[in-house]
Each structure stands twice: as structure tokens, then as C-alpha cells.
Amino acid sequence: MTDESISNETRLTRIQALVVEILNDLLRAPIDRTDQVIHQAISRLGAYCVRDRSYVFVRKGEVADNTHEWCAEGIDPMREHLQDLPLEMFGPSLEPLLMGEQFHVPDVAELAEGSPSRLLLEAQQIRSILLVPMRGEGATYGFVGFDGVRNTHEFLPGEIYLLQSLADVICSVLIRRDKELAVRAAQAALAGERAFLESILSTSAMGVLVIDGEGYIRFVNDAAEAVMRSSRQQMIGARHDSPTWAYTREDGTPFQPGETPFDRVISTGASVPMERFALHCPDGLHYCAVHAAPVATSNGAAARVVYALVDVSDQVAADRARQEALEEARRANAAKSNFLAKMSHEMRTPLNGVLGVAEVLERLVVDADQRRMVRVMHDSGALLLSIINDLLDMSKIEADQLELEVVAFVPAELAHRIDSVHTLKASEKQISFAVHLQGDGQCARLGDPHRILQIMHNVISNAVKFTESGSVNVEIDCTHPDRLSLRVQDTGIGMTEAQRAMVFEEFGQADSSIARRFGGTGLGMPIVRRLADMMGGTVSLDTQAGCGTLVTVDLPLGVTDLPEQPASPVINGAISTEMQGLRVLAADDNRTNRMILGAMMGQMGIAAVLVSDGTEALETYEREVFDVVVLDISMPDLDGVSVMHEIRAREAQRAVAAGGRPPATLLPIIAFTANAMSHQVASYLKAGFDDCLTKPLQLERLRSALSTLVEERGRRRPASRGGVVPLRANGG
């Protein structure tokens, strides 16, 4: 086309036809061919208009990219160099383009010499240029350009108008493609995310069921198939409570309407926490844990429910096995406790005879050799009693039945007691023994003084027992207001590392030779450790074979302003005189026990009436007046508790009988038993006994109990001649 040979009207007609054809191609082209159609469009227009280069720039914020380019023969392409160009590099042409106006320079040489536009265009060897803006959504999206490098060219206004229409269509096509590609990318990302989630759900160890608002299953993953023991095909479209896999509570009770996790989520819109259920499947009974949660729809309604399922059949079986094992352990522990209690009772009864006779004889025998033999008999019985007590203490600790007192006590008094107890034994072995008190030993502290003494006695007894020469030094540290420390240092045989590892094991001994040489049950230090643990304290050992042992016990026993618990009253000769002629009814089915009671009471000047069973005790109670009654708990025909209740009932009847006059105080009744465990003693006192004497009986304990009750309640009749009054010559 030449400007001279073709009229302007013809030019417009021809370019109009070409633009219409190109526009039709652009609008009909598929999205995937957008770039090819645009390239064809600018190529045809550039060639028709005898231009050297035609192109499209697309704006991206403050930069622009040359996205499409056509070059005439002999013109070098520039597209690859025109990417990410800052907008300011377009110079004066930028402002009209941003305003939606064309930038048209038919001949660059006609521009003012040295002007920015001329300098910029001449630097690019451009002789004429037309830039047509592409406007979309109220902003400049980019522009279409036509350059003349070898020739100049002036576009007619009509041509520029048609080219502007073309630029607008190219812009709309590009924007449509951008949106379509964005939609495709979003759909691809969504599909990828969905595939990713499905792969996670499929490979998840947790089963997942999705249930619609009507209760029908819509999604099942692989793990759910395994948990439910059904295939995906069987479950999808079926109801969540289908009889094929009907679920009940773990104990087998069925759900009532509205109680299933699905029903609860639908009704409340809230999650139902993990709960175990029994699955009644065709292949048997299984168990699963279900967490149900709502899935909100676009309007916020909880129209669907997700079940997260975990197979807990093995866990349920393990829990039940563990529970059965615990029950078996409890039964075994109860059997052991009952056995120990029974053995304690059976062993304390003969021990009562041994220790009771020894204590009575010690007060009667004057010959030194005989007294020494009586003392050996007494010490042997006391050792056996100590072993029994250790066994019972360990049994109570293991059964969590041992309770600690929290009362005020004075450390100095404990120090005095352990000094008096262990000094004699140490002197017999000709070893030095000393107790040192650091700090304020007179300041009261809170704790269980009986168990603290037990800890001290066990540790010190071991130190004295395993020390054949040298010394045993005891240090009680009261310098800390919130802690009491006991340190026992001996020069004994010490321990190896292997022996040290066994020292806190129950019934543990360093080795058989040590057990044969020194004796013992191996319960002393385990009891120390258990008691210290119960008090929140610690026990540590520092020992070396042949070099002695240091035992340190730290107990968190703080100081207190509470008054110290009063000590047991001291029984002296004056009180013994007060009991002269006291009348006591004592019932025990064991002849030895009756003999011990009679002998001990005889030494105190008490007139004791001894009977062999409960029935005889009631008959004697009706015939005579007594100041105190002592009843054995375990008598065959009528036990002590029953006799005590009958006596109380008869006292009440006499008080309300016509002409009857109730006594000023109730008759003191004391339990006498070999059931020496603390809870047993407590039960007898709760039953109504005024005191409880445990076997083996000690003279001073008997004296204390009788004198205390007589002092509280007085005598029932004037004092009479003392002695033992047997009711039957053949009694037992």
C-alpha cells in the first residue's frame, strides 16, 4: 500500500475490512490460542501498514513486558531485551498512554531538536511511531505499538480509531485469558489440595467417615474400612447406624434415640469428644474410639458430621487384662495382709506367754544366774516380736494402710530416748556410743514422733549390730527451721557397691555369711526408706567395705508453735498402791494368757477373777461387782465385742428399771487381743471399748491402762484383800 496511489477513503475501507477480520479471529479464538492469534493480528497489520515493527506491551504495576512482537524482514527482534522495563523508560509517551490517549509521531525529525521524545526515539533508530493504549477495568492495561525504522508514516484519524478498537479487543482477550488462567490455576490448586488431602486421609492411620445431614455416609477412607470391618462400597450411601456395623456403648448397652455422636452433633452443633464404642460386626465384637465433629456449610449450619475412628480393640483387651491383673494383685495383697494378720495373732498369743512369764519372773527371781537366763528369754521374745512388727509395718506400707500422725514433738526428747535405749547395747559390745544434738533441740516440730523414732532405732540398731569395735556416733541436726537431719556414723564392717545396691531391698542381706553372722530379717532399712518417702524425706548412704558407714536421713519437719503432745503418764508405786484390792474381771480362753494376767495383776495387788469364755464372763458380771473388765476379743462361744455390748445393754436396762439407779460412770471395759494392727485396735475402740491391750502384754502397759481408767471413773466398791480368785479349778 502506498500513500500516493490509494485515496484516504480506500485506505480506510481496506484497513476497516482487515480490522474486522482480525477482530473476528480474536473473539472466536480459544483461550489456549490467544498468543498465536494476537501475533497473527499485529503481523498482518504491521505488514499492511508497511511498518517495520509492531508489538504489544502489558503493564505489571510499575513495569511493563513486551509480550508479543512482529518485525519486518531485515529488522532485529527486541522482545527478549524488553522485559520488566520500568515505566519511566517510556519517557514522554507514558503520560498520554496512562490517560487513555494515543501517542503518535509521524516523523521524529519534525520534533524539536533536543526534546526528550526525539532523543529517546532517535536512540532506538525509530523514525515514526504510533502507540495505542489498551484500557481495561478503568486503568491502562498496556498498549499496542507500530514503529517505522526505515520510513516515516502518518496514520489517518480513522485508521487510529480502528487500531484503538483493535487494541481494546486485544486487551479484553488478554484480560479474559488472565482470568481464565487464574481460574484454572485455582481449580488445579484446589484439585491438588483435594488430592493431597485425600491421599492423607487414605494413608491416615485414623479412620474418617463423613456423614451428611440425613445420617448417610458420604466419604470413607482406607483406615475406616479396617476399623468398621466393611468395604467402602458397603458403607457409602448407607446409614451411620446400619445394623451391619451397629455400635453400642462400650459396656454393650444400646444408644437411645438422639444419643449417638451423630445425633448429638446435629442437635448441638458442637463436637463430641473421644468416646469408646463397641462395634457389633459380622466377624465378631470390636471396639473403636470415635470423635465426632460438625462440618459447617456456607450458611453456618452444621449439616454434616465427621467421625474420626481409631481401633482400640487391643487397647480395650489390654485395659481389661490390666484391670484383672490389678484385681488379682489386690486379692493377693489382701490375702497376704490377712495371712500376716492371722500369723501375727497366732504368734502373739504364745509370745504373750513367753514375754509375760519372763517379765513376771524377772521381778520374782533373785539369783543372778537365774535372772540372766530370764533376761535372755525375755530378749529373745522381744526380738521375735520386733520381727513380727517389722513384717506388719512393711505389709501396711505396701497396702497403703500406714497412716502418719502430725503432732508436735521435741527432738531433744527423742534424742534422750534413743540414747537410753542403745547405750546399754553398745556398752555390752564395748564400743563407744554418743548422741549429739545440734541447734535448738527444745523447739517443737510437726511430725510423727513414733515413726521418726522407728527410723532412728532401725538405723542405729544396724550401726551397733555391724560395729564390732570402735564407735557409733549419732547426730541430730536441728539447725534448719524446716528440716530435721539424722546422721549415724559407725566404724563397722561397711559395704561393697554390690551390697549397697541391696540394702533397701526387702528381706535383702549383703550375703548369706552376713545373715548367718549378724542375723536379722533385712526389713529394717527398707522400712526406713519407705517411712522417709512417706514423710517426703530422703535417705542416703556413704559406705566402704571395712571402713564403716554413714547414713543420712533428711526429713522435712518444720518448727511449730503448737504445744507438745503430753507424754504417757508415769506409773509409780503410789498409783500401784491406789490399785491395791482393785477388782478386775478378766476373760480369755487361753490358759497361759489367764495365768499371765493373774500373775501381773497379783503383783499389783489386784483381786482378779479369771474366766475362760464370754458366757462365763457375763454370768460372773451378774453375780459380782467389778471395777474393771478385761475381755479377750477372740473367744470361741461369745467374743469380747459381743460381751461388751451385752454388758452395756444390761447397764442401760438397770438404769431405766423401776427403782433402779444408774451408776455415776460406765463400767470400764478393756479389749485384750493379739490383733495388734492399728486399724484393728481402732475398730475395737470405735466399737465401744475404753482401751485396748495388745499381746504380748507388758506389765507397765497393763498398770497404765488400769490406773488411768480407775482414776477417771473411780471404784465400784471399797478396796478388799488382793489376790487371784479362780472361779473354776479346771478352768481351761
Image: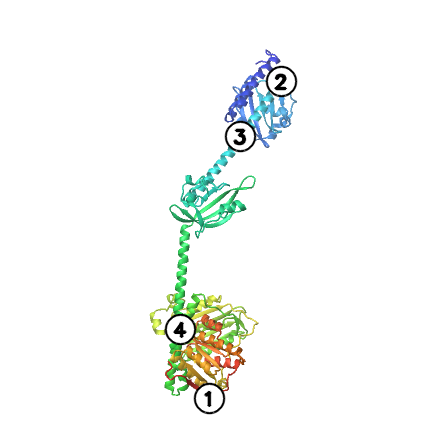
Q: Which residue is mark 1?
A: 721
Q: Amino acid at mark 3?
A: Glu
Question: Is disc 4 in contact with disc 2, using a CB cutoff of under 8 Å?
Answer: no
Percent across and percent down for residue 519 are 36, 73
Q: Which residue is mark 4?
A: 345
Marked residue nearer the N-terminal end (4 or 3): 3
What crowding class fits label 2: few (fewer than 14 Cα within 10 Å), some (14-19), or many (20 or more)? Answer: some
Residue at disc 3, secondary structure:
helix
Q: Compared to 434, does 542 lie above or below?
A: above
- How far apart are labels 2 and 3 at the CA level? 33 Å
Residue at disc 1, secondary structure:
loop
Which numbered dot is residue 158? 2
The mark lying in front, picked from 4 and 2, is 4
Which numbered dot is residue 180? 3
Residue at disc 4, secondary structure:
helix
Quarter of image, res 154? top right
What crowding class fits label 1: few (fewer than 14 Cα within 10 Å), some (14-19), or many (20 or more)? Answer: few
